[in-house]
Image (cartoon, rainbow, N blue to C red):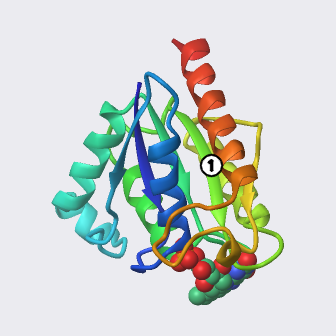
């Protein structure tokens, strides 16, 4: 099973990118997680779209289509979806054969705060509903107080968080099997 992981943070020392890298290592047998980079996606402009999709969007769209499932790992910005991730979803949503349609998707997120991205995850679920994805319902993985759960080198050091990520990936695997 081939999963495409997307981090909703562009910053170098992102906890969410650290969590995605941890997921790569925790992937259950039979699952491989590749990472997509959304740095090159421009700001959505419908005039640009009408003139032709940017290569960065076309390439990402193709990678999402080719993947068996997607793993979105996102920060929470002002209780909602960071602009860079929403912008990426907006671009991909306008591609002719929108690749999130029918795609199994798992969501998780990390925050230095105590709520651990719970609020953004519900906003993301709403967007994915419109895109007709199948999102993993449980477990929900809210990585709170992230500074205490990763080493300075970016390694996940918290066993319960590792267990929760593993459980999420197993649920994603099962959802994919059920959907065929
Ligand atoms: C514009 C902005 C808004 C933020 N709003 C929230 C928020 O609503 N909830 C939260 O838990 N953290 C919030 N934060 C703090 C982020 O969780 C924190 O910067 C986190 O490290 C971002 O994820 P990253 O480490 O993957 O880049 C916000 C940060 C920024 C820059």
Which residue is more in the foreground, 52 or 126? Answer: 126
Instruction: Tell me which corner region of the image, top left, top right, bottom left or bottom right, holds residue 130.
Output: top right
Which residue is more in the foreground, 180 or 155? Answer: 155
Residue 83: percent from the left, percent from the top?
51, 75
Q: Residue at x 54, y 21 (%)?
A: 176
Vertical comparison of 53 with 70: above or below: below
In this orientation, does residue 92 appear? Answer: yes
Residue 136: percent from the left, percent from the top?
68, 35
Vertical comparison of 11 with 157: above or below: below
The response on whether ligand 1 sits within 8 Å of label 1 is no
Q: Residue at x 83, y 74 (%)?
A: 114
Residue 147: percent from the left, percent from the top?
66, 78
Vertical comparison of 158 with 1: above or below: below
Which residue is more in the foreground, 125 or 20? Answer: 20
Which residue is more in the foreground, 123 or 31? Answer: 31
In the visual, does 79 lie left or right of 99? right
Give the residue number, with chain letter if any, for mark 1.
Answer: 107
Q: Residue at x 49, y 64 (%)?
A: 18
Ligand 1's image quarter is bottom right
Instruction: Tell me which corner region of the image, top left, top right, bottom left or bottom right, holds residue 32.
Output: top left
């Amino acid at each position: 099973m081939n999963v495409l992981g997307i981090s909703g943070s562009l910053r170098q020392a992102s906890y969410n990118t650290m969590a995605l890298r941890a997921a790569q290592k925790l992937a259950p047998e039979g699952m491989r997680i590749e990472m997509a980079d959304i740095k090159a996606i421009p700001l959505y402009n419908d005039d640009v779209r009408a003139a032709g999709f940017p290569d960065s969007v076309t390439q990402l769209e193709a990678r999402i289509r080719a993947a068996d499932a997607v793993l979105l790992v996102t920060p929470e910005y002002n209780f909602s979806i960071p602009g860079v991730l929403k912008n990426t979803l907006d671009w991909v949503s306008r591609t002719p054969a929108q690749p999130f349609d029918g795609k199994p998707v798992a969501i998780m997120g990390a925050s230095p705060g105590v709520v651990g991205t719970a609020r953004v995850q519900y906003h993301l679920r709403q967007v994915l509903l419109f895109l007709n994805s199948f999102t993993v319902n449980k477990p929900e993985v809210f990585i709170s107080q992230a500074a205490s759960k990763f080493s300075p080198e970016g390694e996940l050091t918290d066993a319960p968080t590792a267990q929760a990520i593993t459980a999420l990936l197993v649920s994603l695997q099962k959802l994919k099997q059920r959907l065929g």
